[in-house]
Amino acid sequence: ITVNYREAYDMYACNGILFNHESPRRGETFVTRKITRGIKQILSKQTDVIYLGNLNAKRDWGHAKDYVQAMWLMLQQQSPKDYVIATGKTTTIRDFVKKAFMVLGIEIIFEGKGINEIAKIKSCNNPKYKIQTGLTVIKVDPKYYRPTEVDLLVGDSTNARNDLGWNPSYDIDSLIEEMVITELNNSV
């Protein structure tokens, strides 16, 4: 028997460079989950305020389900290739917070700048939640600023879209809605 050791040890290896991929299962220390969990705690009167860091930071957030699909597609290719997996769109922490509250019919307004920035309840159009207008729900705490903060993180997934036919099925609004609703239903 002749064994070609090169063939016996060939390996299919590729890398997926995955930008922020979120879901309701995200760990509680990640900012997206900290926000959704904080909203639940505010509504259940377990806390008054969510403390966050740099509200101006822009992130390219996609849904973990979409990113898993991209990884599967990468492994189905005839030849291995590395791919960036990202939505190509950014959202600030501030806008993520606004959108998360808005899922529940709660409008917030930001005031101030930098470490003095806060967000207050502007209105609540959901009779299920009795939340006081004017209540401060977001404060900036410098301890949550990253020492090596990157203000903008956005990926270019052109190759994955062209080669794999991959496109995310979730946009930022549907991702946030799923995270908020799941958090409130406590089904994670």
Image (tube, grey):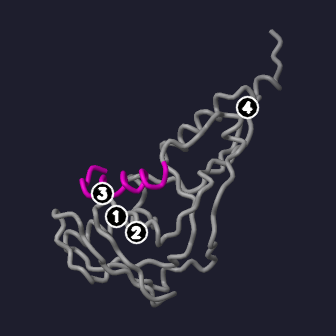
Residue bounds of the magenta highlight: 171-188
Residue linked to disc 1 = 102
- Mark 4, Cα crowd under 10 Å, few <14 / some 14-19 / many 20+, is few
Disc 3: CA contacts within 10 A as few (<14), some (14-19) or many (>=20): some
Tell me the residue that label 2 is attached to.
98
Place of residue 128 in the rendered image (x, y in percent of width and height, measured from the top left) = 16, 62
Task: Mark 3 and mark 4 in contact? Answer it, CB < 8 Å.
Answer: no
Q: Which mark is residue 183?
A: 3
Numbered circle sitting on residue 11: 4
Tag 1 near tag 3, CB within 8 Å: no
Marks 2/3: CA distance?
Answer: 16 Å
Q: Secondary structure at mark 3?
A: helix
Rendered view: 105 above or below 25: below
| 45 to the left or right of 22 | left
Disc 2 + disc 1, Cβ < 8 Å: yes
Mark 4 and mark 1 lie on one chain; the one further toward the N terminus is: 4
